[in-house]
Amino acid sequence: MTSTLKQFKARAMARAEVRKAYDELTDEFAFLDEVLKARTEAGLTQAEVAARAGTTQSAIARLESPTSSHSPSVATLQRYAQALGYRVEIRLVKERGLTSRSSGRAEKRSRSLPASRRRAA
């Protein structure tokens, strides 16, 4: 019997260690999907993006590769995005269930200050 990709994935994901490794890569693959989608929508080749960004085609290939151990700098990502007509937006997103002792103290301190001395949120 031939196994389909969906069946293979379902069997693999049933294994705890595979599920954990897969989940750890979710954000990285989501980023790569955005990068490749942007270049596809721009209708440019890696070489064309490289020329616009002032780098080499191989540098663009590394940036777009899921197997690369290279972590591009923010400046590199900005040049890549500009070459495609985009801009880079970086956000910190609070993890569910994690708490910070300092955030509670800052909130209490803020409440104890007169309204004229509190920073606008």
Image: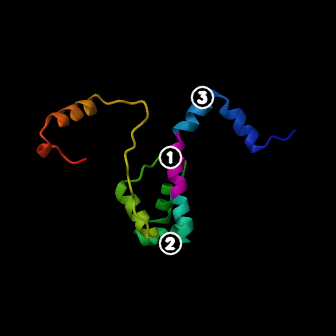
The range drawn in magenta is 25-34
Residue nearest the viewer, comparing 109 with 71: 109
The amino acid type found where label 2 is placed reads: Glu
Q: Residue furthest front?
A: 115
Tell me which label, 1 or 2, sits earlier in the chain: 1
Q: Which secondary structure lies at badge 3?
A: helix
Front one among 111 and 4 = 111
Looking at the rendered structure, the kind of residue marked 3 is Glu
In the rendered image, residue 39, in percent from the top left (x then y), is placed at: 53, 65
Residue 111, by quadrant, is: top left
Q: Is residue 3 magenta?
A: no
The residue that label 2 is drawn on is 48
**From the viewer's perspective, is the residue at label 1 or at label 2 nearer?**
1
Which label number is shown at residue 28? 1
Where residue 17 is drawn, which disc sits there? Answer: 3
The disc placed on residue 4 is none
N-terminal of the pair, mark 1 or mark 3, is 3
Distance from label 3 to label 2 (Cα)? 40 Å
- Give how far across and how far down residue 36 sits, in percent: 54, 60
Q: Residue drawn 60% across and 33% down?
A: 19
Q: Is residue 57 left or right of residue 16?
A: left
Image spot of residue 90 (x, y percent): 38, 52
Q: Residue at x 12, y 46 (%)?
A: 116
Q: Residue 105: x and y, percent? A: 22, 30
Mark-to-mark CA distance, 1 and 2 = 24 Å
Real-space Cα separation, disc 1 to disc 3, in angstroms: 18 Å
Quadrant housing the N terminus = top right
Q: Amino acid at mark 1?
A: Glu
Residue 85 falls in which quadrant of the image?
bottom left
